[in-house]
Image: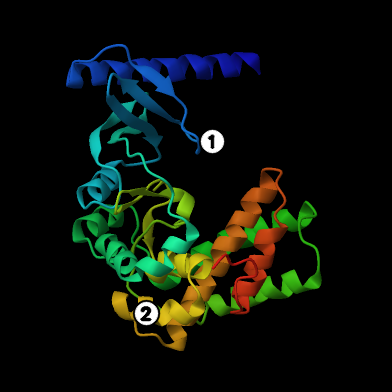
């Protein structure tokens, strides 16, 4: 076990030295220091600093081109350099300093938020980049997600993470509802749009941690933000600003994707030794299209 760890450390140091060489050549600066970010410790990323220059370096799964495009359209930090080291893609991004938006921020910025989301939903080049690895239809995407959820659900049950028949009933409903969702055109989605993955640089909102970006249901990101941070009485204002038709089919999709997100988080928490009950309660409420049980608005 120690040999495996030691080899991993040698590989990591080798990659970091290569990054430092790139930075020295590009910016003619030496004396770079490395710092782990406050969040995202489970991911391979570092903050590099020399003098007053500061950059975020991250190794990403798959192709880094979508991240570059997100930076160009202004919804993610700008990518200054990208490449492959030891078979893994990396990006060097501008380091943006700013707080996470408080939960109260969302209700007061619905028009801004809808325009921000539409910017990446409707970007044709980003759609083209993501389409290279995904040619699924909406129905195929939902069916694939349900199949993955079923595997994790069974693992959760076997490990004793499911308590109460009402959770079984809720999962059965999620599975059945999947077949009745309105099929729509897919769009780029972040998939984890919580306020911890957002930064406020003055008046500018930036989203980070795009590891799960894919083509998905356009309401997936919108729904999670609304359900977590915005009172239902204000949802119509967001729908109008975005251009959604606020009908029951839209709400069915919104709650379904929100329930899915809560269940995915609950499974991850249980698999990593955390108490998952809070997000299981959220899952149960979203499946039934009820209010968020621990909403902060």
Q: Residue 237 carries which label?
A: 2
Write the residue at 47% across / 76% down: 253
Q: Is residue 263 left or right of residue 56?
A: right
Write the residue at 50% across / 75% down: 231
Q: Mark 1 sits on what residue?
A: 42
Q: Residue 135 carries which label?
A: none
Residue 294 drawn at (x, y percent): 64, 66
For label 1, the crowd category at 10 Å Cα-Cα, with few meaning under 14, some 14 to 19 and many 20 or more, is few
- For marks 1 and 2, the one nearer the N-term is 1
Q: Quadrant of residue 92?
A: top left
Identify the element where label 1 is drawn: loop
For label 2, the crowd category at 10 Å Cα-Cα, with few meaning under 14, some 14 to 19 and many 20 or more, is some
Q: How many labels does the image show?
A: 2
Residue 112 drawn at (x, y percent): 30, 65
The relative height of residue 17 versus residue 143 in the rendered view (above or below) is: above
Q: In which quarter of the image is the N terminus?
A: top right
Q: Foreground: 146 or 69?
A: 69
Q: Quadrant of residue 141?
A: bottom left
The relative height of residue 209 versus residue 288 in the rendered view (above or below) is: above
Residue 40 drawn at (x, y percent): 50, 38
Write the residue at 40% across / 78% down: 183
Q: Foreground: 211 or 31?
A: 31
Residue 59 drawn at (x, y percent): 39, 33
The relative height of residue 267 versus residue 245 in the rendered view (above or below) is: above
């Amino acid at each position: 076990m120690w040999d495996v760890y030691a080899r991993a450390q040698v590989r990591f140091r080798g990659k970091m030295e290569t990054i430092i060489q790139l930075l020295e050549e590009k910016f003619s600066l030496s004396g770079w220091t490395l710092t782990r970010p406050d969040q995202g410790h489970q991911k391979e990323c570092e903050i590099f600093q020399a003098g007053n220059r500061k950059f975020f370096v991250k190794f990403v799964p798959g192709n880094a081109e979508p991240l570059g495009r997100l930076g160009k359209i202004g919804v993610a930090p700008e990518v200054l350099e990208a490449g492959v080291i030891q078979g893994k893609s990396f990006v060097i991004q501008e380091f943006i300093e700013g707080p996470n938006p408080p939960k109260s921020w969302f209700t007061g910025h619905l028009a801004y938020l809808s325009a921000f989301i539409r910017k990446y939903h409707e970007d044709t080049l980003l759609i083209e980049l993501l389409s290279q690895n995904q040619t699924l239809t909406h129905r195929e995407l939902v069916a694939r997600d349900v199949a993955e959820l079923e595997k994790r659900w069974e693992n959760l049950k076997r490990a004793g993470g499911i308590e109460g028949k009402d959770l079984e009933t809720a999962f059965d409903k999620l599975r059945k509802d999947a077949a009745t969702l309105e099929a729509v055109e897919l769009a780029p989605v972040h998939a984890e749009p919580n306020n911890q993955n957002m930064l406020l640089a003055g008046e500018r909102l930036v989203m980070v941690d795009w590891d799960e970006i894919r083509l998905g249901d356009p309401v997936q990101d919108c729904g999670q933000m609304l359900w977590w941070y915005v009172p239902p009485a204000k949802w119509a204002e967001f729908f109008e600003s975005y251009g959604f038709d606020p009908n029951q089919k839209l709400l069915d999709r919104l709650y379904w994707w929100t329930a899915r997100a809560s269940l995915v988080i609950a499974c991850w928490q249980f698999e990593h030794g955390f108490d998952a009950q809070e997000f299981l309660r959220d899952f149960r409420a979203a499946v039934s299209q009820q209010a968020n049980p621990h909403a902060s608005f």
